[in-house]
Amino acid sequence: MGNMLYCCNCGHIGYTSKDVKDLKVGNWWYCKNCNEDMVYTPITDVQVWEDMDSEAQNECIVQWKEDKKNRAMYHEKSNKWFIAFYPFLFLSIISIGALGAGIITSTFIIATLGLIVTAIAIPMAAHCFQQSEYYTACAQKISSSELWEKRSKERKEKEAQALQAEQEFAIKSQSDSTPWNKRYFTDPCPYCGHYKVRYASWDDKKLSVAFWGVWSNKVGKNFHCDYCNRTFNN
């Protein structure tokens, strides 16, 4: 499953690149739902998004909209400074030419005027170019990744705590003397990594065996995971 795409205009969320048009301008995609620009969001883990409550999702959406607004502002400033760069560049070329012509022809006034204009135009052109690059860099730095990483980290911490609790329960179940309680192994499931592995019973196999008979893939399997519902052999 590919990255999710969130449309700031209509709220449409797509799970694959098929949900957007092929046309892409810079970092913006176009939403098929409303034909407006779509923010390419940092949702690389769909499960993290689906595990969020509505308040957390709205917090991310607000952040994405704010990021889009700030990026547009910085790009606009960068373009203005870049446009201002060209007149000073052109003036610098003319003034350097005037300076050279004044020196060659020994015309003091033209040489002096060319020197003064050159001394002003070149620093101004450099300043405009630096400002344009600065605002472009500011636009590129804006990202919702910090907020998204925070949510992803919270989810990973919860998963780690849940796995630890499962492991502790599995260890405790090994010493449980009550015959009807399930006893889980202390080794995790090779498929999902959870500590919900126990000996497979007939109830885990009967439907598959009844339908497929001896061709059932559960025949001969000795272990079953209650988390992912897979039956397997170690």
Image (tube, grey):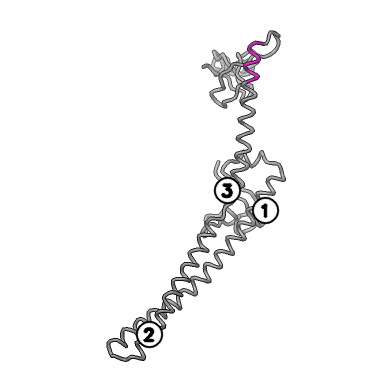
Q: How crowded is mark 3: few (under 14 residues within 10 Å), some or many (20 or more)?
A: some
Percent position of residue 44, x then y: 56, 43
Local SS, label 1: helix
Q: Is the magenta stretch mostly helix, strand or loop?
A: helix
The residue indicated by pointer 3 is 145
Q: In this view, does 161 lie above or below 14?
A: above
Percent position of residue 29, x then y: 56, 56
- Mark 1: amino acid: Val
Local SS, label 2: helix
Q: Earlier in the sequence, mark 1 or mark 2?
A: 1
* Residue 90 is one of the magenta-drawn residues: no
Which of the image's four quarters has the N terminus? top right
> Measuring 58% from the left and 57% from the top, which residue is drawn there?
30
The residue indicated by pointer 1 is 62
Q: What stretch is highlighted in magenta?
A: 168-175
* Residue 172 is one of the magenta-drawn residues: yes
- Mark 2: amino acid: Gly
Percent position of residue 27, x then y: 53, 57
Q: Nearer the viewer, residue 181 or 107?
A: 107
The residue indicated by pointer 2 is 114
Q: In this view, does 228 lie above or below 109?
A: above
Q: Which of marks 3 and 2 is nearer the N terminus?
A: 2
Image quadrant where residue 96 sits = bottom left
Q: Please identify, in this view, whether the residue under mark 3 or under mark 2 is nearer the observer.
A: 2
- Mark 3: amino acid: Ser
> Measuring 51% from the left and 62% from the top, which residue is drawn there?
136
* Residue contact between numbered discs 1 and 3, judged by CB atoms under 8 Å: no
